[in-house]
Image (tube, helix red, strand yellow):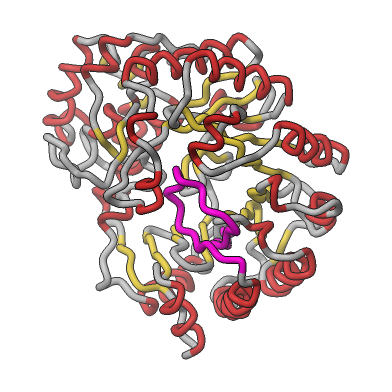
Amino acid sequence: MLNDNSVSFDKDLITRYAQAGPRYTSYPTALQFHDEFNDGDYTETARESNEDLVPAPLSLYFHLPFCRRVCFYCACSKIITNNQARSTRYLDSLHKEIVMQGKLFDRDRCVDQLHWGGGTPTYIGNEQMSRLMQVIQKNFTLRDDDRGDYSIEIDPREIGPGTIKLLREIGFNRISIGVQDFNPAVQKAINRIQGYDETAKAVEDARTQGFHSINIDMIYGLPKQTLETSRQTLKQLVDLNPDRIAVYNYAHLPHIFKTQRQINENELPDPETKLNILQLVIDYLTQNGYVYIGMDHFAKADDELAMAQKTGSLHRNFQGYSTHANCDLIGMGVTAISCINGCYAQNARDINEYESLLEQGKLPVTRGMMLDHDDELRRDVITKLICHFNIDFSFYEDNYGIKFHRYFHDELSRLALMEKDSLLSIDNEGIHVTRKGRLLIRNICMVFDKYLPISNTNKSYSKVI
């Protein structure tokens, strides 16, 4: 098992293994959800989770889909509008869902993790944010010791002078700031004009108000990005000194995301430049005090993510890497996904359907799936690989009643080809991902995905690098 969190950048291998594949924020992925699973299945599963010997604590996710302006690169589920009445109607529906969901879970199950995502959660006004948190607190048991992981995504362009202070007062202690790139030409090409100074002010305010952790999101592979512009952006980013940094690969999928059709494909960096930018990102951040966690994520060595990776407790869910592996996740809002006691459940993806179902007094769950023994086993393998780059055969044999080499005979045969390329090593004890393999961890995980064809041609997935 690797302990130094380093990676080895091999362009030839990365080019050879370039293909599309899942990001594995869940396994099975949402493409496997089906509409035979409904709100009744979810309700039964949720209530059964209260009867576990030790019921899991809760993680709550709230989807606030509204944005005032469209960012051309965006692949999120969002609604672009300046009509505040639209968000008011949506919040009324969300409040109803919170009440209905709260009745399904025993109140002694504490909320260890809470996250507002979007869209732009700070699109709604201060009074609306305060009211939403009050409704949550009335229907779920939030921690009162500031030890929960309560986070929110913000857009520095969409906050007023007192917004960050208010967020801290109503219970948030972690903040994630979207930036993507600081270069003005890149910002213009993606329709996201955001000055460095207003971002720095948001970071400064978050520190002043005592937020425990600050994350900043960046993207590489955007139009007009070059090695030099990326180097300058990284310097400005490190100067802000965030606790965590997520540097995402821009996935250009205009056949799926219509807003991306407004990006000039001729301005996108060529594959070699994009790889050079990625290598620069890894080298620059690791040389400036950040640990490579995995996929696109970096954190300071004393951050909880880095510590959880060292202790083997790191987890991955729909919000990315997490330190809360033992929580049942309840997703609320349009498109939100829950993961509870062996099931995935997704709310209606159309906002009108979402609001209509709640108006009828129904939970807005419209699709999902129950996991069988094989799903849970493969999910565990994939999660361990993507979080820790290492799996121990004996763990699965003891906990799932299998002989690993026999159960995964075909998968191990396919991994042998990757072993020849030095992406990993296999011995009698387990699988160990090498420094070269860390950047290609999605490829390794795909071997264990029974729903994914060996010759993957699914256009719904982004490139692994």
Q: Is 81 contained in the magenta span? A: yes
Can residue 5 be seen from the camera position used here? yes
Q: Residue at x 44, y 78 (%)?
A: 352
Quadrant in which residue 385 is drawn: top left
- Residue 248 to residue 258: above or below: above
Q: Is 111 contained in the magenta span? A: no
**Residue 316 in picture, x, y percent from top left:** 47, 41
- Residue 309 to residue 358: above or below: above
Task: Pick whichever, 200 or 56, lies toward us.
Answer: 200
- Quadrant where the N terminus sits is top left
Task: Pick whichever, 293 or 284, lies toward us.
Answer: 284
Can residue 3 be seen from the camera position used here? no
**Residue 143 in picture, x, y percent from top left:** 75, 57
Q: Which residues are magenta?
A: 60-82
Q: Residue at x 46, y 73 (%)?
A: 351
- Quadrant where the C terminus sits is top left
Task: Pick whichever, 387 or 19, lies toward us.
Answer: 19
